[in-house]
Amino acid sequence: MRVTLAGYVHLARMIDKCRAVLAGTEGEYIYPCPMDYRVLEFAGLTDTQFTEAVKNHPSDEGIVDWFRQTATPRSATELEDFNQKLLARGPSSPESLEKFKKYRDAVDPSRTDLTAWSDLQDLEEGRNVPRRTVTT
């Protein structure tokens, strides 16, 4: 999740999810998901445009070239700010919080310190997610 591609966190994951949907092998992955839409909106793109680009460019490099040519240009500061906000984003409604807790509890119910979707995705996919101090 934290790996950057073309300066964007989540872009590599989004490409992989889109490819899986196109191949019919997405399993439990959702594309486009709310996080995908946030990246696409910030980049000034639609999910239809992105999906077509993935269809038409078999390599990550081809998609990145297309993305850089097509996306709304952003300064390094804008991009870093966007990435940090995306990584910190947690549930935004009571329903979303319930879904978050359900997913978290299925992976590791002891991780009540998690508050961001990106951390939950990393934990679910076996990446190390440092424990955080829970404040009340």
Image: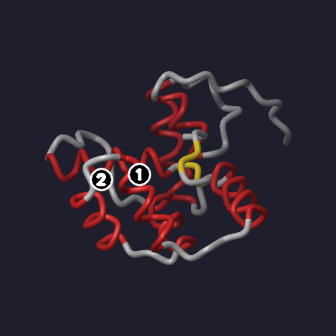
Residue 88 relative to residue 35: left or right = right
Query: Which residue is drawn at the image coordinates 45% and 60% (left, top)?
Result: 36
Query: Which residue is drawn at the image coordinates 52% and 34% (left, top)?
Result: 104
**Total residue callouts:** 2
Who is closer to the viewer here, 114 or 59? Answer: 59
67 vs 110: above or below? below
User: Hey, what amino acid is under mark 2?
Assistant: Cys
Who is closer to the viewer here, 68 or 25? Answer: 68
User: Hey, what amino acid is under mark 1?
Assistant: Met
Query: Residue 110, position in %: x, y?
Result: 62, 22
Q: Quadrant of the C terminus?
A: top right
Q: Which residue has dot 1 on it?
A: 14
Label 1 to label 2: alpha-carbon separation: 6 Å
Query: Residue 38, position in %: x, y?
Result: 53, 66
Query: Which residue is drawn at the image coordinates 39% and 75% (left, top)?
Result: 46
63 vs 74: above or below? above
Residue 74, by quadrant, is bottom right
Are the residues flagged by discs 1 and 2 in contact, CB closer than 8 Å? yes
Who is closer to the viewer here, 27 or 81? Answer: 81
Query: Residue 47, position in %: x, y?
Result: 35, 69
Q: Which residue has dot 2 on it?
A: 18
Secondary element at image label 1? helix
Who is closer to the viewer here, 50 or 33? Answer: 50
